[in-house]
Every structure is written in structure tokens, then in C-alpha cells.
């Protein structure tokens, strides 16, 4: 009788471990498939693809590096 109890507990333990592993796998798969990482916005991408706008943005970033203040750049008028 004791042997049957140990076997039953072992089976339940294996089922529990498989359930936990399946749950973790499902959650990780859900996280990786439903997320999209955008490093740059669509408007920003359009702006840097245009050579004139890209040049103006480079100047604005250079102004920021010199002054340390975004308010002193022409960033808003460029975008």
C-alpha cells in the first residue's frame, strides 16, 4: 500500500512539474510573439531618410551637445 502511495505522489509531482513548465513556456512564447520594439518613431524615420531634414537634425543635436539644453535647439521646427 505504501508503494502505491509513493507511486501516486510521484505521478502527481511529475504532472505538476510538466504543468508548470508548460505554463512558463506559454507565457514566454506569448511575451516574445506579441511585442514589437520600435527604436525610432515613424516620423523620426521619415525625417532621417530625407537628407535635408537629417542634416538639420544633426545640427540640432550638435547644438544640444554644445549647450546642453534642448530648448536652445530648433528641434521642434524641424520635426
Image: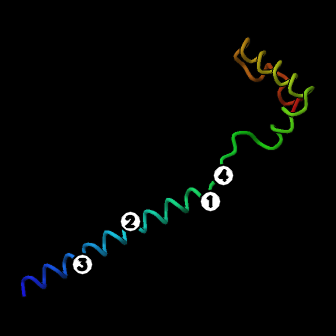
Density class for disc 2 (Cα within 10 Å; few <14, some 14-19, many ≥20) is few
- Closer to the chain start, of discs 3 and 1, is 3
Return the residue nearer the eye: 60 or 39: 39
Return the residue nearer the eye: 1 or 72: 1
Q: Quadrant of the C terminus?
A: top right
Quadrant of res 55: top right
Label ID, residue 34:
1
> What residue sits right under mark 2 in the picture?
21
- Closer to the chain start, of discs 4 and 2, is 2
How much space separates mark 2 and mark 3, taking CA atoms? 15 Å
x, y percentage for residue 61? 77, 21
Residue at 77% over, 23% down: 71
Quadrant of res 16: bottom left
- Closer to the chain start, of discs 2 and 1, is 2
> What residue sits right under mark 4 in the picture?
36
Residue at 66% over, 47% down: 37
> What residue sits right under mark 3 in the picture?
11
Task: Report the label total.
Answer: 4
- Closer to the chain start, of discs 2 and 3, is 3
SS under mark 4: loop
Amino acid at each position: 500500500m505504501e508503494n502505491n502511495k509513493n507511486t501516486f505522489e510521484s505521478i502527481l509531482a511529475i504532472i505538476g512539474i510538466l504543468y508548470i513548465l508548460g505554463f512558463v513556456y506559454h507565457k514566454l512564447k506569448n511575451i516574445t510573439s506579441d511585442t514589437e520594439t520600435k527604436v525610432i518613431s515613424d516620423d523620426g524615420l521619415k525625417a532621417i531618410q530625407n537628407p535635408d531634414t537629417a542634416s538639420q537634425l544633426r545640427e540640432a543635436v550638435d547644438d544640444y551637445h554644445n549647450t546642453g539644453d534642448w530648448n536652445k535647439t530648433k528641434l521642434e521646427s524641424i520635426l
